[in-house]
Image (cartoon, rainbow, N blue to C red):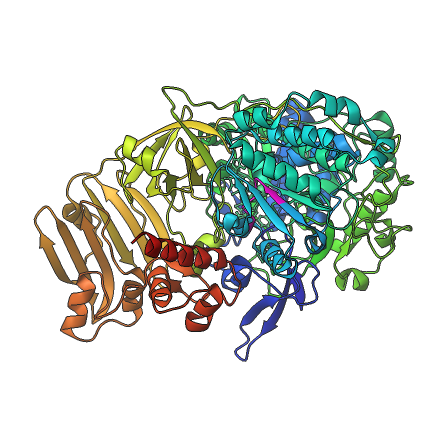
């Protein structure tokens, strides 16, 4: 059985089989055009997320378990009461690019079509909103021209604000492969920090944060001055001369100054683009999540339009989508400023959608965008919000204000697959949704490819598909016919029909050729790229090869861009600039990946990466706990020194939250500064200061079963096989703190201590290890895999127990930090193998197996080899 990965926008096909003991086996779908059999470490670990641990199993109203009938009645009644008292504009939905297209369509239809207001926005506002504005302004439609196969036809790949190696790993592996096959292919990475993606870069432009628009505007100017304008484009692009003219002040010198880059590197980049017969720019959150995100997108599209590097194999502005169905959400109109099926709010479009839906009152103007929407909740204008498939208490900027808003809101409904998240904690009504592997529907990836997600396991508890929950509520609210679907394929057909309704080639999104497919055909639908219509019955690989665009005159538009810097600026009080983003093995707010031991090994706790110069200035050492503070809030995380950062800037991952660490949620720090055109927050730049977080002790505590530290200590939680590993820090005396926790009843205790230096304790119950604790003034160094193993296989002799008390395995060599999550291979093992002569990632793979499964760690293997070679050269 084939399905699609529920994580990133690469949209990999996944094949499900069962082994002899009927356990689910996950592998890459060799036929799926997005991945051709590959999976990254998150995709490969999907089988490990199927357990029911932590799942939300039953509907709940005010903390009490209720039946579905009662939950649906309550939701409908309470929403109607709010509407009756305050009008429909007092109700809002906040949805997600992780919903399936069918779910998303229903949410949008209910809010905009039948409640008659457009107060539905989605987490795509934090993600793709700027890209959407960029495409619409330039191409007349939110239409990604490119596809992954373009990687095989290009001479130049520009990765702008994209850590592809970690965030879109299979696309990255395809790029690595393409470069092997095409020695002419050059790769440029534009990112203020050195990332794993830079591993294949011929040129890394570590520009000043937020300065990208100047780089691309300067490139346009360079093209204009060096014969890089494609004259044939003049006939199909408006604003070409005016835009080139407006770029004329951006000499390579001015760009170098603005972006704080060496001028010769800037010119190398310009020359590469000028001379490449094809060029592809892949861009992601380093571009979109900016107070000038939309303009940055247009600055990128401008150079492709001017040079004609668009609409043919190997060329184009290729926005990578983040979530598995960010694109599907854009198709149904999930954002507050779209209507449905690529329509907006003109009178003609509102009328068209109203006739199609047989609705008397379709919303006739845009609704509130995410940041404003939560602001309206906070000041009481919105009285009821239904959140589905997203965790805004963690992921929206200015997190403390968002949490306060939800606390004040009279009615918070949350549909989720997890029982305990920072957002479900604030809900009045909880609705259990079916998760990946249970639900059925379609998703659309970065290259416009629609694929099926298919159910293959029984749903957990009473969970239901999101579309079903929404439709049942809608019917109870007085719209029985319009929401009377029996099967998700019914919804898909309606969505496909709307896409073609009075379209006549005016709207890019058109899948009308799928409007009449049977349930069986929907069920076996093969991955296909839209448009799928009379002109393209088998789908369409690349858009704009005919040079016809979607503005009414059929032309594209170039847009003069005035490069600006971020709203967030360092000053004396807030001297550092904080950057945020993803790590390789975690997905967003960790609700699924955070509980998979294999995925918690590579990076296990919230950290703050900073340059050694800054560390010295603020008296921080590697491994210290550091307090990072902005005007909005503060967090505490582990200091991690690295020259990959520019002096003056920090990087903190976006993932940690109250379920995994006491003070780790970085969005508490981010100000809600947004792009004026897209409403997308500037999540990549915040002015902060740092200082060492003083604690008297730090500890590691391992124990099986449920436990939660009380207030007063810093903690971070790591899921291991069979046990939880807690990292702790506190004031006073660690030993007394441990005793106060009441965990040591009926245990035989084995301890070791040196007054004021360290305290170690093992608790034994009938020969089994029941608890292990190490504390010291600094973070205790223990061999975590050996300790975890001791809980299932305790050492049998005194020497083994003695070694364990020291946090080691008897005679065992510590593996070091896990680099290869698939095979659990640690850094020390890899370094030893390199010392033993393994000089390539392939040789390491042969010796240790690392990197031979999903390949996500290959950049790091190469880095370790390079570092070792470098050390040798210097010694
Ligand atoms: N492992 C993993 N993969 C994921 C996800 C995940 O949670 N985990 N989430 C998915 C989602 S929803 C998304 S949106 C994508 C995001 O994918 P990416 O955008 O690739 O990931 P990020 O780490 O958010 O940010 C990318 C890079 O932008 C850089 N950056 C910061 N400021 C600037 C700037 O001013 N200019 C430039 N040029 N670069 C800058 C950062 O240093 C960072 O390396 O990942 C998807 N894939
Ligand atoms: N500082 C900072 N903040 C950021 C970003 C950043 O780079 N930096 N990135 C932003 C971006 S690009 C994004 S996309 C967001 C992501 O942020 P969120 O969308 O808040 O993160 P997730 O953890 O993916 O939340 C998904 C929720 O839906 C639940 N869920 C999973 N499957 C289903 C389902 O089938 N149905 C339902 N109803 N629920 C389900 C999960 O348990 C989880 O609670 O974060 C944004 N926030
Ligand atoms: S690259 Fe990884 S996370 Fe993204 S879709 Fe493929 S397997 Fe899933
Ligand atoms: Mo995203």
| Quadrant including the C terminus | bottom left
Pick the residue in front: 307 or 194. Answer: 307
Q: Which residue corresponds to the image point at 61% horizontal and 68% vertical from the top-left? A: 16
Left or right? Give the position of 367 relative to 535: left
- Residue 8: x and y, percent? 59, 51
Quadrant in which residue 871 is drawn: bottom left
Q: Residue furthest bottom?
A: 20
Q: Is residue 117 visible?
A: no
Q: Which residues are magenta?
A: 158-164
Residue 326 is one of the magenta-drawn residues: no
Quadrant in which residue 357 is drawn: top right
- Residue 555: x and y, percent? 85, 32
| Quadrant including the N terminus | bottom right
Q: Is residue 32 visible?
A: yes
Q: Which residue corresponds to the image point at 80% horizontal and 36% vertical from the top-left? A: 230
Vertical comparison of 697 with 443: above or below? above
- Residue 155: x and y, percent? 68, 50
Left or right? Give the position of 163 relative to 765: right
Left or right? Give the position of 123 relative to 107: left
Count the marks: 0
Residue 159 is one of the magenta-drawn residues: yes
Vertical comparison of 298 with 245: above or below? below
- Residue 740: x and y, percent? 18, 47
Q: Residue furthest left?
A: 755
Pick the residue in front: 430 or 822. Answer: 822
């Amino acid at each position: 059985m084939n399905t699609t990965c529920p994580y990133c926008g690469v949209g990999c096909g996944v094949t499900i089989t069962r082994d002899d003991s009927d356990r689910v086996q996950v592998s890459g779908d060799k036929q799926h055009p997005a991945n051709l059999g590959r999976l990254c470490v998150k995709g490969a670990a999907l089988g490990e997320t199927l357990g029911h641990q932590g799942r939300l199993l039953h509907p709940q109203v005010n903390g009490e378990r209720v039946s579905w009938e009662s939950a649906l009645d309550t939701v409908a009644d309470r929403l109607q009461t709010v509407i009756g008292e305050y009008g429909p504009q007092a109700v809002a939905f906040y949805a997600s690019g992780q919903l399936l297209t069918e779910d998303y369509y229903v949410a949008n239809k209910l809010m905009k079509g039948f409640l008659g207001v457009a107060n539905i926005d989605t987490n795509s506002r934090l993600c793709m909103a700027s890209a959407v504005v960029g495409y619409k302004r330039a191409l007349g439609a939110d239409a990604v021209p490119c596809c992954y196969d373009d990687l095989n036809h290009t001479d130049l790949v520009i990765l702008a604000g994209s850590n592809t190696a970690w965030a879109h790993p299979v696309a990255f592996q395809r790029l690595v492969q393409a470069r092997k096959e095409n020695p002419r292919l050059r790769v440029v990475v534009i990112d203020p920090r050195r990332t794993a993606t830079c591993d294949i870069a011929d040129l890394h432009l570590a520009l000043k944060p937020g300065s990208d628009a100047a780089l691309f505007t300067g490139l346009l100017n360079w093209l204009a001055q060096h014969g890089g304008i494609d004259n044939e484009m003049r006939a199909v692009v408006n604003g070409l001369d005016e835009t080139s003219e407006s770029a004329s002040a951006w000499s390579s010198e001015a760009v170098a100054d603005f972006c704080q880059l060496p001028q010769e590197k800037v010119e190398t980049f310009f020359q590469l683009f000028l001379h490449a017969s094809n060029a592809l720019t892949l861009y992601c959150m380093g571009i979109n999540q900016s107070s000038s995100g939309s303009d940055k997108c247009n600055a990128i599209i401008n150079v492709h339009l001017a040079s004609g590097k668009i609409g043919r194999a190997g060329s184009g502005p290729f926005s990578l989508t983040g979530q598995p169905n960010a694109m599907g959400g854009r198709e149904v109109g999930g954002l507050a400023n779209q209507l449905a099926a690529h329509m907006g709010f003109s009178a003609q479009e509102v009328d068209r959608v109203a006739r199609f839906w047989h609705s008397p009152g379709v919303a006739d103007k845009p609704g509130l965008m995410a940041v404003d929407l939560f602001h309206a909740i906070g000041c009481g204008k919105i009285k009821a919000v239904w959140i589905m498939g997203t965790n805004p208490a963690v992921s929206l900027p200015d997190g403390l204000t968002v949490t306060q808003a939800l606390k004040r809101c009279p009615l918070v409904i949350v549909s989720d697959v997890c029982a305990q998240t920072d957002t479900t904690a604030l809900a009045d009504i909880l609705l259990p949704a079916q998760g990946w592997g249970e639900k059925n529907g379609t998703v659309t990836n970065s290259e416009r490819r629609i694929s099926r997600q298919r159910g293959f396991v029984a749903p957990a508890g009473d969970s239901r598909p999101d579309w079903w929950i929404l439709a049942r509520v809608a019917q109870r609210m007085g719209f029985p016919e319009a929401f009377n679907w029996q099967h998700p394929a019914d919804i898909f057909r309606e969505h496909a029909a709307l896409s073609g309704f009075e379209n006549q080639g005016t709207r890019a999104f058109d899948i009308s050729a799928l409007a009449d497919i049977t349930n069986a055909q929907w069920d076996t639908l093969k991955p296909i790229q839209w448009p799928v219509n009379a002109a393209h019955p088998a789908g369409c690989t690349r858009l704009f090869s005919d040079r016809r665009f979607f503005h009414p005159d059929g032309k594209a538009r170039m847009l003069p861009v005035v490069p600006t810097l971020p709203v967030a600026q360092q000053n004396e009080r807030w001297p550092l600039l904080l950057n945020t983003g993803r790590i390789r093995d975690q997905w967003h707010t960790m609700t699924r990946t955070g509980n998979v031991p294999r995925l918690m090994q590579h990076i296990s706790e919230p950290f703050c990466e900073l340059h050694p110069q800054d560390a010295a200035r603020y008296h921080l050492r590697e491994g210290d706990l550091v307090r990072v503070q902005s005007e909005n809030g503060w967090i505490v995380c582990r200091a991690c020194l690295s020259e990959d950062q520019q002096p003056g800037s920090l990087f903190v991952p976006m993932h940690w939250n109250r379920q995994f660490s006491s003070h780790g949620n970085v969005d508490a720090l981010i100000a809600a500064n947004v792009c004026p055109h897209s409403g997308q927050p500037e999540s990549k730049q915040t002015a902060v200061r740092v200082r060492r977080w003083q604690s008297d002790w730090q500890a590691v505590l391992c124990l099986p079963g449920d436990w939660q530290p009380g207030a007063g200590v810093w903690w971070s939680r790591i899921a291991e096989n069979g046990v939880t590993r807690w990292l702790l820090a506190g004031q006073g005396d660690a030993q007394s703190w441990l005793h106060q926790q009441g965990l040591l009843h009926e245990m035989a205790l084995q301890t070791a201590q040196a007054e004021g230096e360290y305290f170690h304790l093992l608790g034994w119950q009938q020969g089994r290890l029941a608890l292990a604790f190490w504390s010291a003034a600094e973070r205790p160094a223990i061999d975590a895999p050996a300790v975890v193993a001791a809980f299932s296989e305790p050492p049998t002799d005194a020497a083994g127990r003695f070694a364990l008390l020291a946090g080691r395995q008897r005679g065992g060599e510590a593996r070091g930090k896990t680099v290869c999550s698939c095979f659990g291979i640690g850094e020390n093992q890899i370094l030893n193998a390199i010392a033993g002569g393994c000089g390539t990632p392939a040789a390491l793979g042969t010796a240790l197996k690392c990197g031979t499964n999903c390949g996500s760690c290959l950049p790091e293997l190469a880095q370790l080899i390079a570092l070792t070679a470098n050390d040798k050269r210097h010694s």
